[in-house]
Amino acid sequence: MTVSTTAIVRPRRTNRRIGRMLISSPTAILSLVWLVGLILASLSAPLWLPYGPLAQDLNAVLQGPSARHLLGTDELGRDLFSRIVTAAAPTMLIALLTPIVGVAITIPLTLWAARYRRVELVMNRVSEIVLSLPGMVIILAVIAAVGTNMVIVMSLFGVLLFGALYRVFFGQAKSLHRQLFLEAAAVDGVRPMMASLRHVLPNMSNTVIVQFVLIFGVGIGMQAGLAFIGLGPQPPAPTWGGMIQAASKFIFQQPWMMVPTGGVLALTIVAANALADVLSGGAAAPPPLVQLRRRRTPGPEVVAPAAPVSDRELWVEDLVIGVDDGPELVSGVSLRVKPGTVLGLVGESGCGKSVTSYAMLGLLAPGLSVRSGRIRWGATDLARADERALQRVRGHEIAFISQEPSRALDPMFTVEWQLAAVVRRLRGTGRREAKQIAARLLTDVGIVDVPRVLRSYPHQISGGMAQRVAIALALAGTPGLLIADEPTTALDVTVQAEILDLLRALVAERDMSVILVTHDLGVVADICDEVSVMYAGQIVESGSTRDVLLRPEHPYTMALLASDPHTILDLESIPRLASIPGQVPAPGSWTPGCRFAERCRFAIPECSSPIALEPRAIGAGGVRCIRHDEVQGRQDEWRVPAVAGGRA
Amino acid sequence: MLIFVLKRIGFAIVTLLVAAAVAFVLVHLSGSTPGGVALGQSATAVQIHEYNARVGWYDPWIVQYTDWLGNVLRGDLGVSLVDGRDIGADIAKRLPVTAALAVFGTLFSALLGIAMGVAAAVRGGAIDRAITVISGILLSLPAFWVGVLLVYFFAVKGHLLPATGFVPFQNDPAAWARSLVLPVLTIALTAAAGIARQARASMAESLTQEHMRTLRAVGTPTHRIVSVHALRGASLPILASIAVQFIVLFGGSAIIEVLYALPGIGQAMQASVGSSDLPFVQALVLVATLVVVVVNLALELFTLALDPKLRTS
């Protein structure tokens, strides 16, 4: 249910083209300018550098920066600036060999393996072996064999990276191969290798480029490291690593010496990594599901003296919830749940039902907040409560069960561990007593084989069983109100009925009240005392279950009833299942008038003016429709296929 | 389960054989011969040829390879061509140095990296961006340069710690610890970034899972959600990144050991490569691979024990 609404706050990763990605990022431009500029400056160095890289001046050894020697001189009086610039091109161009060789070897093998299962098995093994070789040690052994020939050494380093590159590339190639358009290409008679080159490779280009740039940085570091331990290009040719080694020898006499070389080396690798970072689309982490930082408490609201709320009664008044700096998700919802009753909160996906239910326990995801309104529970206003007050309510007084039982439990711990931990905290019992209570709770929720379930991890039990465990978890603190967010949606029909029976029994036994969020009117008819129908962030109709389901007054409620498969059985004369044309309008696109008007077959021009919740014609409750007197009893018209809406 | 473990052990042995073969081939492709290295430049070609023939250098490769492996299995890694040391005994003496470096380096970089990654994922916003930038820079800094800077500040300027050198634990535990502080700090600073990135990504993913809402709804305090549930959920990929870090440190110890003059196997590798001490190079490749393979095996068994889904299937 939450998918459509929470998607608004999630940063969406767009598939921008690489070129535009580079241009639009200052970091990327700076990095590119640094890398390319350094290579160009180095290649053209003999033309413009004032000193040759090997020109010694024994009268000016170990100098700091000066006008004559911009970055100072080394132990032989050679100009550091000249040496750094001269060393740049060989270092960077040879470092390019590593990613070139690595990518050139890995890509064909990856494409081959993605195509043929047998090749895949072999390649997986080979890559695993290569990955297990200690890279640096092998490189040193290579140097023992071929000497300090950097071209060979850095190329072989690329070969050794096959293991790691294959891992990255293969996953992507495989999933691309599974995609439909490749199947289509095969049907069209495109040759396998052509299909790979034409369809798979271009889609992998971003990953390949990112890895290429990353490895380029690693290659530079590796080369400098080898030069540092004296196994790189041999002196007197300047190398960054060799110059840092020299600097480390003269660290007592002239510590400055290590600054420029190390700085340039570090900046070059930083530039490569930053470039790769930008190309991979940045690393924006998804926001956590629950608020972890201290909540901004909404500003104090002028509280009109309100009628007292009885102890275990929930009274939501004009609740407005919105995305911070974004659209409103829930506009002015009011609900009242008396002790021992079940309230159904009904509507299509994206109506704001789940968000409303999250707000009651301060469970709104980061980025969402209550803008105004009150959630009164006894003497507290939960909409304005601080974390400490919420903690006194959560689990103790109000509990929550979510729609996906198998994902609602922590997969890493056993049922007993999770239940006992919650019991210990909510009831303040010892370890042993908590375990006994946990077992008893499982019996209460109708689990037969309690010892086995206690020992199990969540993945070892069925969805229905998991929902029972989740209910047991919710009961651990003996709450007065249970908020159930689509508790049966993810379950098989037979299991649904069992869970509903269980909820009904709990309400009767424990004098608990329940808010049941659902889109299933059958469930509502089954268990709810009162119903509130939500549409696009508003309550459009409320009243007793009997009134709302049998004598709906709002066209949306009628449409929902007409499109409910359960009701066909009752109305054999018109065996048609209605469908409501169009979709729930997205938050932010709501009009000031009736939000259902554009999908409503009874809509008239007047519907576009603001509409208040009016009292029902029959029974207690409200309706948000200016024509509710006229359309009453016409729900069967929704079954007639026709283009709906005032615009038709 | 047992079959899985046996399979992995078998695979580890294959990896070792491949590494041994690579080392063997590399050594035989090099221009050097044992005689040339051992006898030095003063020796005549005839003397060198005699020496080579005596150690079996002209035998078929497969014979030499199996002979060598046979010796290795008997615990005989050969003697150094340069000074006739027993290679096995020398490596045994050096291993504790590198192991201490890698173990403490991994330990501290793991602590630092996990703290950074968790803070970034949990706090988000400006803290996340700051940590991401810092870890991006740390990831790019060459360890040897960071090492030289640390030596300058702590040893040259501050006189707090020895710049280089090593004191064995048996001689003086306090001095041993002091000699390891700077190398370990160098490693921790540069290796933490990789772990921090993995920790951040895994924690962030863990925190988006549906059961976080359940935990919050039953009133689980934030510190417990983060440190017990989210961290446990993120533990496997973080552990894998720590193992990778350990392997990289062990293999890449040459640079740190040369910088700080620590008598570990990395330094031996650098020296024996420089002097073409062929049997030494061969033995070191084998030992380094053995360490990697053992660590990987340990990681796999650990993962098996830590992942309920794997353990119970």
Image (cartoon, rainbow, N blue to C red):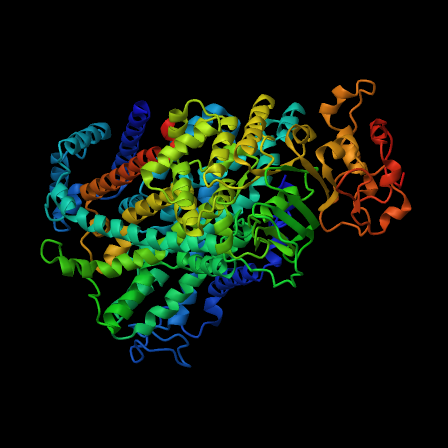
In the image, is residue B127 above or below residue B239? below
Q: Residue at x 46, y 25 (%)?
A: A447
Residue at position x 39%, y 30% from top? A454
In which quadrant of the rendered view does residue A513 lie? top right
* x 71%, y 46%: residue: A537
* Relative side of B47 to A173, left or right: left
Residue A93: image location, x then y, percent: 45, 54
Relative vertical location of residue A87 with respect to residue B52 in this rendering, above or below: below
Residue name at image x 31 percent, y 56 percent: B187
- Could one spot residue B132 in this view of the protein? yes
Q: How many numbered discs?
A: 0
Residue A274 drawn above or below residue A341: below
Left or right of A168, for residue A319: right
Question: Where residue A501 appears, x then y in whole percent?
Answer: 57, 26
Residue B113, how many percent across, how many down? 37, 53
Can residue B272 be seen? no
